[in-house]
Image (cartoon, rainbow, N blue to C red):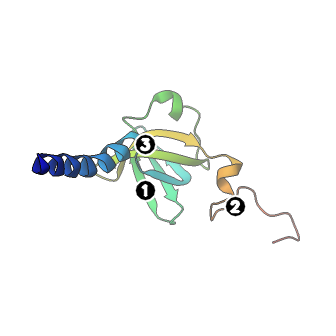
Amino acid sequence: MGNALIALTTLLVSVGPAWGQTVSGPELRGRIEQITDSELIVRGEDDRLHFVDTAAIPSVELGVLNPGDDVVITTNGDGGRGPIGRSVRQRGPAEDAGSKRRAFPPEPGRR
């Protein structure tokens, strides 16, 4: 009985975090540099270019995007060239507050 309880606890502890991660998935935050038929090229907050496969992203979410938009992309893992996107949304001003990037350019004379 004790061994079965330990095994069950170990299984739940090891599966729990993996299941939780697949529900929301890791996020990529950045600015769209280019949009192609099959991928978004995004400059991440780490200042690197990321090639995001858009095959799994609903076309309704992709249709409103333009180069220069700040976005948050939920990913499902890595594809051949980069992460596989699962969903995308435009980043709002409240989310930009914690970002390294400025939502708007500074006013003249201010820094």
Label 1 to label 2, Cα distance in Å?
20 Å
Label 1 to label 3, Cα distance in Å?
19 Å
Q: Are marks 1 and 3 in contact (CB under 8 Å)?
A: no
Q: Residue at x 34, y 53 (%)?
A: 82
Image quadrant where residue 19 sits: top left
**What numbered label is drawn on residue 21?**
none
What's under tag 1, amino acid-wise? His
Image quadrant where residue 101 sits: bottom right
12 and 66: which is toward the camera: 12
Instruction: Determine crowd level at label 2: few under 14, some 14-19, many 20+ residues with C-alpha closer than 10 A.
Output: few
What's under tag 3, amino acid-wise? Ser
Q: Is residue 65 above or below residue 28?
A: above
User: Could you say where residue 27 lies in the image, as x and y percent from the top left?
Assistant: 46, 51
Circle 2 residue: 102
Q: Residue at x 69, y 58 (%)?
A: 97
Q: Is residue 50 above or below residue 19?
A: below
N-terminal label among 1 and 2: 1
- In the image, taking residue 84 as reference, residue 87 lies left or right, namely right
**Residue 15 in view (yes/no):** yes
Label 3 to label 2, Cα distance in Å?
26 Å
Q: Quadrant of the N terminus?
A: top left
Circle 1 residue: 50
Circle 3 residue: 24
User: Could you say where residue 109 lies in the image, as x and y percent from the top left?
Assistant: 89, 71
What's under tag 2, amino acid-wise? Arg
Which type of secondary structure does the marked residue at label 3 adopt? Answer: helix
N-terminal label among 1 and 3: 3
